[in-house]
Image (cartoon, rainbow, N blue to C red):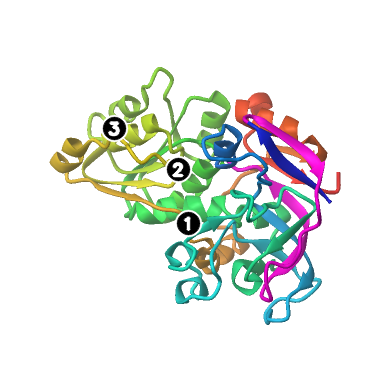
Amino acid sequence: MRAVVLTADKTVEVVTVDDPVLSGPDGAIIKVEATAICGSDLHLYHGMLPSAGVQPGHEVVGTILEVGPDVRERAVGDRVLVSGVVACGHCGACRRGDPISCLVTGPIALGTTPALHGGQAELLAVPAVDLFTLVIPEGVSTENAVLLTDILPTGFLGAQMGNIQPGDSVAVFGMGPVGVMALASAKLYGPSQIFAVDVVPERLARAEAMGAIPINATDDLGALGVIEATKGRGVNVAIEAVGNQRTIQDALSCVAARGRVSMVGVNLEMDFPFPMALAFLKALSFRAAFAAIPSTWSNLLPLIAEGSLDLGDVFTHRMGLSEASKAYEMFDNKSDGMLKVLLDPSR
């Protein structure tokens, strides 16, 4: 089969690799119908994590071609979306949809290690398929199904952890795909104002069209822009959807006393300069988390079905898997107005 492989820093190639085999008796092989490039894939692309030989991709929709003998709730022919995060598949945490709390393997993102290949490919092996996939209901589009594999649950978690109350003011830092999902989710809680902070004009315009007040953070003016826009008060809640040191500091700086900061951007630094005095003196709450994706599906599916979530057209580009190298380059550089790209393995 064809698959995207990271061959060096900032280099991906589409090459022919061996077809996947079942990961175990509870696993399945899926023919990939659609897959996407996520912002966290860029950590691998930039060499922030060991990546040579990794087959990336954790946002996958497809059809089951083969199941192991222990699979009970899925069958060949089922059209499913796949959780971008998996774990052992046997412990109590996994069985309640919380791979983050798995004590056996801990959470594992598909396509981040050579031991667990990702889905930017024609085929994908999925472990514990009963737990880590969802049959796509009628009426849910392919695009929304892909969003449910990672970034919508992540953005939803960002809003959830902020404990947004009706009438609160909210700032979302980063209007990339996860930030757009966080903005859409924050609106469900009835805030009085939502500020969208970014440096890319097209992304700020998209946020404004979704009802947010745009704040241009060019020249590191993100926190100051929010404070000025609130006449010095700051916001009740800041959602950080980038993972960059600057945006995390800005999120912490722009919240009012007793404010809440919710971080869902990926930052894996062990030595982070946390502004402890600021957090202490303002009595701030800070939460950061990796989304337990399957646990969110029961909440998110009805919201999608009812049209309560204004997700916009997040996928600005659609390309073939054969164009993955170009797609990564465009996504990394935010060129041609790219927000998110959907890859078609049939092309």
Viewer-side label of 3, 2 = 2
Q: Which mark is residue 230?
A: 3
Tell whether position 18 is magenta. Answer: yes
| Nearer to us: label 1 or label 3 | 1
Residue 137 is situated, as x and y percent measured from the top left of the image, at 69, 68
What's the residue at 56%, 41% (across, down)? 177
Segment tinted magenta in the rendering: 9-38
Q: At numbered mark 1, what does the secondary structure look like: helix, strand or loop? A: loop
Residue 19 falls left or right of residue 128: right
Kind of residue at disc 2: Gly
Mark 3 vs 2, N-terminal side: 3
The disc label shown at residue 265, or none: 2
Residue at position x 29%, y 32% in the image = 230
Is residue 278 among what the camera can see? yes
Amino acid carrying mark 3 in the image: Thr
Q: Earlier in the sequence, mark 1 or mark 2?
A: 2
Q: Which mark is residue 48?
A: none
Q: Counting other residues with Cα less than 10 Å from the Cα at mark 3, is it few (<14), some (14-19), or many (20 or more)?
A: some
Instruction: Identify which residue is drawn at 46% across, 37% down.
Output: 242
